[in-house]
Image (tube, rainbow, N blue to C red):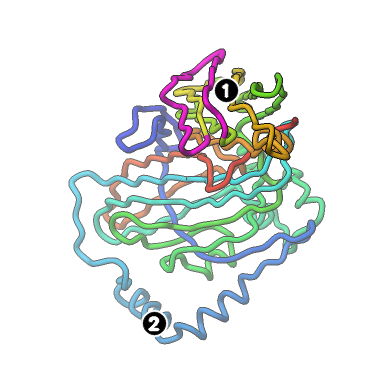
Amino acid sequence: DGSVHTSDPPGPFFLVVFLSCRSSHTRTHAKTKKGKTVNTLDALLRRRKKDAAEDSSAGAATLGVTGAVPWRKHGIVYKKNEVYLDAIERVSALVGADGSLISGRVNGSIQMKVYLSGMPECKIGLNDKFMMEAESGFQQATSTALEGRPTSVAQKACRSQVALDYIKFHQAVKLQHYESDHQVHFVPPDGEFELLSYTVSDTKNFTLPFTVTSWYKSLGRTRGELNVKIRADFPSSLVAFQVITWIPLPKSTVKVNMQATGGKTKSKYVDLAKNQTHWKLSELRGGKEHKFKAIIETMAGTQLSGSSPTKDWEKAVPPIKLTFQVPMFTSTGLRIRFLKVHEKSGYQPVKWVRYLTCAGDDYEVRVSH
């Protein structure tokens, strides 16, 4: 019942972990600020009671008497009972030219596809700090726990705690259960829905999947050289896909010669209209490193102009940008510790858990010059 198997995915991701366990659902908020944890669950409960008192009381009464909930119909039947859980993180970052993280954030979510008969009750456990502290008997967050020391056997099994700054749960999540045992209990809607979303904004609480450094040097009045080095900082058992580095070009560029130790550097990638080119690695295995170099040729400046546009560009080279997808990896270290499903008919559903980390709206690396 706790075995984990690897299999080809039936969905859009590249790798899939099959958990022969069961499932669960939640909704609440929590914030971490300057090393101290402020649990806003009570405030959320009060707000929800004020904003939707009638709906909540009606739904609770209906559930208690008939087992029905507003978001799920009675009488749902599937020949094959399945649950898909996708943990997706989008990483935005500003990285220094030396590869150090200057600022950033992770916006994460857990998306679910539920194809279950009857009126199932689900339960999910995450390796976030608040859950770990509750299971190990902590009544209040301590600075020691927040610094990442193991606080339970479950936490050690997951290898790390995850500090989530802000969590928002689907309405199906039973907040009173989360308050008592810090596990996500819910009766799921049928089909696709977002179970929860979260944000991690403290750069100490997440890691970047790559180390990227970049530098530019002038080779004369009309030529320059831009270099990029990228290393995959995740286990060699994992592979990143569609790792694309977007390289800025001066407006006066007339020609670009590119070469790299891996991936594609086709001439058609040069887009002078958008003042950019790109380097594409279709796959990048964990632990591997590749280098890129572009020789940029520009128009010569006129004698009448006070300064050359190329020289002005060289004084403040725009950052390079990165896009990527890394299946089975999370920057925060978030893991699904268990996924349980209970239905009175006693069926055993098939459960799939998948992870994906990709670039957010802004993933930039400064260029030294």
Q: Nearer the viewer, residue 336 or 200?
A: 200
In this picture, residue 152 sits left or right of residue 264: right
As shown in the figure, which amino acid type bears the numbered disc 2? Asp
Q: Element type at marker 2?
A: helix
Where residue 253 appears, as percent x and y from the top left, is: 55, 29
As shown in the figure, which amino acid type bears the numbered disc 1? Gly
Where residue 162 appears, as percent x and y from the top left, is: 65, 47
Q: Which residue is mark 2?
A: 55
- Counting the numbered discs, the total is 2
State which tag comes first along the sequence, 1 or 2: 2
Circle 2 residues within 10 Å: few <14, some 14–19, many ≥20: few
> Which residue is most to the right?
143
Q: Which residue is mark 1?
A: 286
Q: Residue at x 60, y 19 (%)?
A: 295
Q: Element type at marker 1?
A: loop
The N terminus sits in image quarter:
top left
In this picture, residue 153 sits left or right of residue 325: right
Q: Which mark is residue 110?
A: none
In this rendering, the answer to whether 70 lies above or below 132 is below
